[in-house]
Amino acid sequence: MSSDEKKTAITTVTTSGSEGLFQTTSEKDVFTPRAIDLDETREKAVEDELNVTEEDLLEAKAIAATLTLEDVRSMMESVLRIHERDPNFPHAVIMRIQEFLGNEDVFENPEKHEELIQEMKLEAALITNDSPYAEVRAVVDNKDDPTTPCSTVRAWTIGVFFSFFLAFVNQLFSVRQPAISIESNVVQLLAYPLGKAWERWVPDYRFTIPYCGEHSLNPGKFNKKEHMLIAIMANTAKSLPYTQYIVWTQVLPQFFNQAYARNFGYQILIALSTNFIGYGLAGLTRRFIVYPTYCVWPASLVTIALNSALHNDVNPTVPGPFKKLYSISRNRFFMYAFGAMFVYFWFPNFLFEALTYFSWMTWIAPDNLNLEILTGFQNGLGLFNPWPTFDWNVLLFDGLDPLMVPAFSTLNRAFGMFMFGFIILGVWYTNTWNTGYLPINTNRVWDHFGQRYNVSNAVNAQGMYDHEKFMSYSSAYLGAANALVYGCFFAIYSAAVTHVFLFHRYEITMGFRNLWASLRRKKKDDSDYKDVHNRLMAAYPEVSEWWYLGTLLVAAACGFAGIAAYPTYTTTGVIPYGVALALIFVIPIGVIKAMTGIEVTLNVLAEFIGGMFVEGNALAMNFFKSFGYVTVAHAVSFANDLKVAHYLKIPPRHTFAAQMIATFISTFVCTGVIAFQVNIEDICQPNAPMRFYCPGPTTFFTASVLWGTIGPLKVFGHKGQYKELLLGFPIGIVVTVAVYFLLKRFPKNKVLRQFHPVAFWYGGLNWAPYSFSYAMPSIPIALLSWVYIRKRYLAFWSKYNFVLSAAFGAGIAISGLVMLFSVQWVGIAVEWWGNEQPYVGCEGTACKLYQLAKGERFYPWWNPDEVPAP
């Protein structure tokens, strides 16, 4: 770095004053370079430790000059409290901060520690003037222009149009096999040319809207805030009402056949309730999972990267691999990567399917059972296939793009999945729980004949539990992988709550303090949240918690009306029970999703608890599941949108209005589409038109009967065949507590710091029907991107990494839609070895360890003195 660069005058800020954490000072207050200079070696080390570019460092130098020692001490104490055990935060910086705060001589004799103090000033400036995370700095600006138009006629018109469009298309084809779904990033792509066309062709006609001021049909350049407001509406509208599954199972004659469920009033009441309760909960948790700096929300960064690629005119040249300088713009890079993936996706998904299921070891001996189990992609565990696919979409099987989520998330997930793979092998090869008679890696439920469980053999004509029929039929059995998945679910629930309590209790306490102050309309103690993005957002009026609380109460009232006014045979108590479950888990799940990109779903816990509360009543269990599981899922999804708006500096009240309107539109459109679909002849039948086979509603019905009608006590109770899996609850707590105390004992251990117990258990959830072949390719990609390139070529990584992720995702989505509505729609298939080999032998039909003759059954293992129906 040249001396001329070091002398560059930059507008500086100070930590004093009542206007915020920082305020500008006059040019005469700018420090002299000599006061802050570190030697070149240490300066480069600071860049590496904080993962900052040279440009970031230059800007921070001017700010650091205004900081006093007490300012720095106060800031670093706050940083340490929040980020000490944050795996996303640079570990080397934490070590330096602890060294700084732990040495009292630094503050008693500062002249003896001038270099350390100056370094801490520099790091304090870097941390507080921008995000401490390189991945956020890569795509999010630390500047804002509050005069940029956002809530424009153009944004609302395009946003409302796409809200209608996404709700209609996604709901219509949600019962198709395979389903068709349009994501928000696709809308970003489609909305961009519409916005630019509006900018060019629509006249600048101005008019006044009462209480909203003057508006123009064409406010000028189509900007990123308008564009993101459209994307937020689209992302909200694409979330279909979960109650559609309840309606499908009630209406269809092959399921519960309850005619009253066709009533539009009933359908819209329960749909409005589940959708808006989640939204109200998201708003109430903003101070826990949206505003804090450590809540990065990795998924939001890809959305913002696409937005920046389309709108950012700045194109700096950056050094990168192969000792070259790269000047291609983000926009052009996106278009090249998007086009390449659009074309390439046709090969593994239509022309050469062996590229997707590249289980090349099994091709040597397709019928070899052991080879299939150890290396097989589709019906094996895939533990020992070093490179099992050439299809990028396979890596996204659980929504975690290795370019998007931090490397520690990818590695913990893969490690957990790999380790549980060996446990699954042991369970299956020892025929524990009779799993040797069943496929090893299946998510289906089986009877004691080794056939798929037929729930109609255990219920009466009304869909209620029939004990005599159940005893004369069979209990429900799980494959080896699926059984372990349930154990991991139990463990991850207890681990999530324990982890957030142990590692984030300070931040949670601060969030409750600020929430209470906000409800009492007092000044909030939010000094710890005053990073640059919160300071910039302070320019906009906030949305009161009372607005969100009111939304939650109105939504609950709709739920009470829908359940009580119709013969659901369900107590209205399922709503407060479900909401109580959501209140317990929404903050832990939100914090984990915000930091790791991993979402813990409550479907199994909601089924488990609901099935015990209302045993024998599948419909009541479904309502409990909807208000427990879906409320949290929607709240977390909406919180992600709030973080996107926070990063883009979209006024909170505009975001509130956009989400409310989009949710309202989506709910009515989806309900109207369902009302039409249930009258389609042969819908959800094997001869259904347009492939409307309803895989989702069918699975939902099976789960509702198993966990609602038969009930979890018969499966996991003290007399159930899988009662040992309940040990997952205490094991999840023990592992998390052990990791916590190990970190306290060995705080400098980098491996322990990067180990995340919740992400580890999440890896175990990925089994059945997925194999390790789905997760394995993410490991080298995450290491290449987040470890090798990010460490050596930060500016290059910052410019292109998330743009590449967005481009690949959009290319796959558009290519898949074109493929579906063209060659796949008319049933065109390319028959040759490359499309047939993936389905030969055990890869095509799952092989079992033990075979049953026709009519032969296996017997229960948990009570050898009795041989009842199980």
Image (cartoon, grey):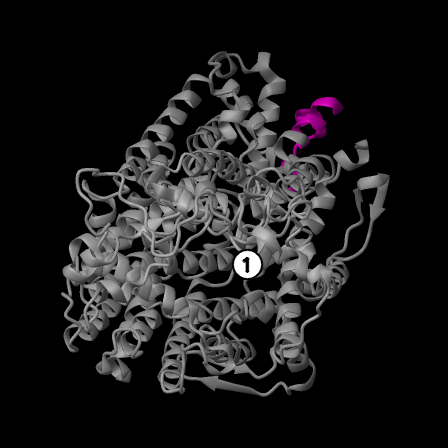
Please provide percent x and percent y for residue 614.
Answer: 16, 58
Residue name at image x 27 percent, y 47 percent? 584
User: What span is in magenta?
Assistant: 27-47
Please provide percent x and percent y for residue 785.
Answer: 67, 42
Q: Does the magenta stretch include residue 43?
A: yes
Question: Please, is residue 811 above or below residue 133 in the view?
Answer: below
Q: Name the residue under label 1.
A: 648
Q: In which quarter of the image is residue 579?
A: bottom left
Residue name at image x 24 percent, y 50 percent? 870
Q: Is residue 102 magenta?
A: no
Q: Quadrant of residue 272?
A: bottom left
Please provide percent x and percent y for residue 762.
Answer: 44, 42
Q: In this view, does 179 lie to the left or right of 825?
A: left
Question: Please, is residue 585 above or below residue 100 in the view?
Answer: below
How many numbered tags mark residues here?
A: 1
791 or 785, nearer to the observer: 785
Q: Can residue 546 be seen in this view?
A: no
Amino acid type for the residue under numbered disc 1: Leu
Residue name at image x 68 percent, y 66 percent? 350
